[in-house]
Image: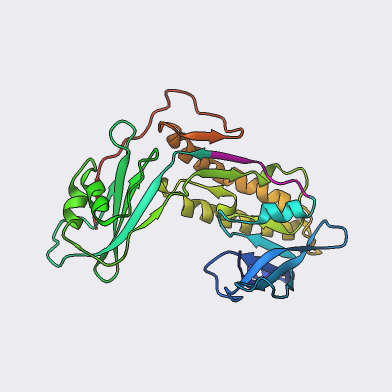
Amino acid sequence: MIANQVKKISRENLSGAKTLGHAVVIGGGIAGLSAAQILTGLEVDEAGRRVAGVRLRQRHAPGSTEILLAADLVVDASGRSSGASRWLESLGYETPGEETVNAFTGYASRIYRRPAEFAAGWKSLYIRPSVSESRRGGIMLPLEGNRWHVTLIGMAQDYPPTGEDAFLNFARSLPTQTLYNVIKDAEPLTNISGYRNTANCVRHYDRLPRYLEGLLVTGDAVYMLNPVYALGMTAAAMGSLALERSLKEQLRRNPSDDLSGLARRFQKRLSQVVDQLWQMATTEDLFWPGTEVKEDFMPVQSGTPVREFKAVPLMA
């Protein structure tokens, strides 16, 4: 867990007025605090009701001294490995319930050099797995420098391999030979990387009976969607808009910069805006044989139509 940024959230940023307070944004890829620092927990006020900051120590130095970074607002956007549930539990708060829908999707990816003689009329290719035809699929996307990013997909535990020959054999087994014919003689530029942590999972921060004021959890730390449906970035963008609207609303409700009620209102708003994407991903995954459902997920009605897709060249 990395605290990557400390920034001033101000009324000028949101609506053109004065300071709201200091915020810590937790998540990768944001310039700010050193990635060598790891977040170990939250600091709260004397009453245990509000965030007062985060505790940090040096990564790869277990015995190092913790330091306190004061903050009025902590936004956890750290993804599937979020520690927010543990932090809440350590402070005596109830942790969110989880729902999981796992179709056991797997990926294997590699980057290739695009052959100079390649002259097809398409730039990208998507072969989507189909319940009625094949558990296997693949994606080919262009990269800068005349390269391709190639990903093989397998549903229902039909995982793509990461061995050299096995990777090509899997590509050759797809419902169409298009992807295989393109990469079989292409020059590989990287090793093959596999990934299988793809289950849909929602952590119900919107249903907590009591909220720690000043802690907001968003992104994949709340809604994890099967990447095969390419909904994760959409969910993150919608969550960012929900955060912006919640902050603006908070400033209107509390001219004195009090953050009371923000956590509850934001988590419920986030659930409302992202729920449709959750339904889309999980409804599709329930049709795959062997899909595992945990907790209180409500199955879709039988007979719901499933969209079937073939290999679709994406034209320039």
Residue 151, position as x, y percentages in the image:
32, 54
Q: Is residue 15 visible?
A: no
Identify the residue at horizontal 29%, vertical 49% (top origin): 138
In screen coordinates, is 296 left or right of 52? left
Prevailing secondary structure class for the magenta stretch in the rendered image: loop
In the visual, does 248 lie left or right of 284?
right
Image point 18% across, 55% down: which residue?
182
- Please indicate, yes or no, whether residue 275 appears anywhere in the rendered image: yes
Residue 87 percent coordinates (x, y): 72, 56
Location of the C terminus by quadrant is bottom left
Q: In the rendered structure, does residue 94 fall within the stretch colored magenta?
A: yes
The answer to whether 220 is drawn above or below residue 19 in the figure is above
In this view, the residue farthest toward the top is 302
- Name which quarter of the figure residue 163 lies in: bottom left
Check residue 195 for magenta coloring.
no
The image quadrant that residue 206 belongs to is top right
Residue 26 percent across, percent down from the top left: 62, 64
- In the image, farthest residue toward the front: 63
Where 275 sits versus 5, above or below?
A: above
- In the image, the segment drawn in magenta is 93-100
270 sits left or right of 163 in the view:
right
Residue shown at the point (18%, 49%) measured from the top left: 178
Q: Looking at the picture, does residue 153 appear above or below residue 15? A: above
Q: Quadrant of residue 186?
A: bottom left
Q: How is the image coloured?
A: rainbow
**Above or below 286: residue 245:** below
Nearest the eye: 133 or 106: 106
Where residue 223 sits in the image (x, y, percent)? 56, 48
Rendered residue at 23%/40% (across/down): 175
**In the rendered image, which quarter contains the N terminus?**
bottom right
Left or right of 67 in this view: 284: left
